[in-house]
Amino acid sequence: MRGIRKIGITGDTHGEDLRLTHEGYGIKGNLGEEDALIICGDFGYIFFDNERENAFLDKLEKECKFLVMFCDGNHENHPRISQYPEEVWNGGKIHRIRKNVIHLMRGQIYDIQGHSIFVMGGAYSIDKAMRQEGYSWWPQEMPSQEEYDEATKNLKEHDFKVDYIITHTAPDDTMSLFYPNHKDEQELNSYLEWVRENTTYKHWYFGHLHQTKDLWRNQTVLMYGVRDLATNEIIFPD
Ligand SMILES: [Fe+2]
């Protein structure tokens, strides 16, 4: 694998071309060949699985200099993502979408340039009623028991000590600050709260709430801006 110098991290991209192509930090921007960008779920560029999306992913492969990594959110075509070839990359399982576009799978821990990174995608769609199953919504949006078990097993193997945690949704206490009633997602939020209580980490980044804010417990919710994973410094503002 090529070396990765700087890792930027951002929130939900929802398949919006501009998020990865505009001058600020996209293809032409200030992340270069040795850099990487992590998207905290709701990647959205694999959704309708049509020609337009495939052409955009091809464009990323051809023109995007940096490595694009994403954890999945709720607004994803999960069955399609899981059809891409699986491989082990830097200690954890990924789906290889393109040469420089990879899906960080649920419950995996990666060792990237000396940083250990625990990833747990998934979330509940509050707009589910307005969506159509198999076309714009998929039941795999919430983790399965196997995925929770895989996450716990990997955390145990790392003695519940990682450098960074990347999720789509938030641990329960944090979620409750925003939405005191979030019962449909509770199972995942509670699991993440258990992870928080038992795991030593330097910083936790998540998306899902469509805003950018530094919170408590070294947790940051991200939307448009790009932060430096290691320092939480702003690479590109919201
Ligand atoms: Fe979203």
Image (tube, rainbow, N blue to C red):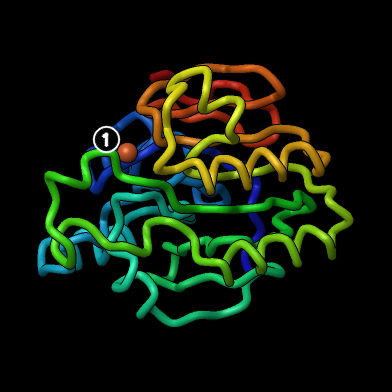
The residue that disc 1 covers is 22
Query: Which of the two residues, 161 or 137, is positioned nearer the viewer here?
Result: 137
Quarter of the rendering containing residue 77: bottom left
Amino acid type shown at disc 1:
His
Image coordinates of residue 148 in percent, x first then y, are: 61, 62
Instruction: Please indicate whether residue 20 sits to the left or right of residue 2 in the image.
Output: left
Image coordinates of residue 174 in percent, x first then y, are: 58, 25
Tell me what residue is drawn at x 40 percent, y 50 percent. 73
In the rendered view, tell whether residue 131 sits above or below residue 208: below
Tell me what residue is drawn at x 50 percent, y 41 percent. 186
Ligand 1: which quarter?
Answer: top left
Tell me what residue is drawn at x 27 percent, y 62 percent. 138
Q: Is residue 70 visible?
A: no
In the rendered view, tell whether residue 87 sits above or below residue 14: below
Query: Which of the two residues, 177 or 237, is positioned nearer the viewer here?
Result: 177
Image coordinates of residue 91 in percent, x first then y, are: 71, 69
